[in-house]
Amino acid sequence: MCPITSEKWSYVDENMIRSVPLFSALNAEDQDELRSMMSEVSLRRGEKLFNEGDKGDRLYLIVEGKVKLGHTSGDGRDNLIAVLGPGEMIGELTLFDPGPRSTTATAVAATRMMELDHDGMMRFIDAHPELSKHMLKALAQRLRRTNNALADLVFSDVPGRVAKALLDLADRFGHAGADGTVHVPHDLTQEELAQLVGASRETVNKSLAEFGSRGWLALENRGVHLLDIERLRRRAR
């Protein structure tokens, strides 16, 4: 991976902070102050940011790349809780409930982030109390996404969950073509995609093969090309 110059880093980070809904209420001066408090972190694909059980003492903002949040059950099974990308945060829960990390964070692509220790973030929130409302909104959105995922596990079959997961990944990481198709470089292995929908790899592969035979999608290495969005939406309901 080619190194990025500090000048480009600064440009990317300033624009990223301004584009994050959580910080959109801050004026330019406050955004610059926040940026000056943060340091840079780079991860290679497969490199861990932290492990489940580690002390949660800092907040991360993803600038580029993707990070998966996973949990290992008591019997050793791995579950994929979420995949986060540019503009999303990791570690905000421990701002309000200090304690060990509840997940393991691993880069699924070359990833660049900015980090800020919790003490610094709390001082900034104390000086900008309006930020607390936006932080709570972000936490509520994360909780709503988790609740929807739990409901899907109970009420949706595996093909429906696969379709819904692909559409969610498309909304967040996809690139729409002029012909109405969407290219989704999700960077996940087949096993990781299976963990994301809470099913076996074999069952998920069967669903993907069925969608492919129907002309709804075309599989790629760590990606997918969605050819019929409307059919997938119907299947996801």
Image: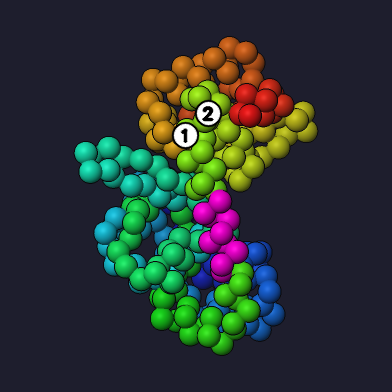
Q: Which is nearer the eye, 31 or 203?
A: 203
Q: Residue at x 52, y 30 (%)?
A: 155
Q: Which range is magenta?
A: 135-144
Q: Is residue 140 magenta?
A: yes
Q: Nearer the viewer, residue 69 or 64?
A: 69
Q: Does 111 sit above or below residue 124?
A: above
Which of the numbered marks, if any, corresponds to residue 153?
1
Percent position of residue 61, x then y: 50, 64
Vertical order, 152 against 30 (above or below): above
- Name the residue beneath numbered marker 2: 156
Q: Residue furthest right?
A: 178
In-image side of 5 versus 18 (left or right): left
At mark 2, the secondary structure is: loop
Residue 220 in view of the camera = no
The residue sitting at 47% across, 80% down in the picture is: 122
Please determine whether, in this image, residue 144 is positioned above or below residue 192: below
**Residue 142 on image: x %, y %:** 53, 55
Q: What is the three-letter code of the residue carrying label 2?
A: Ser
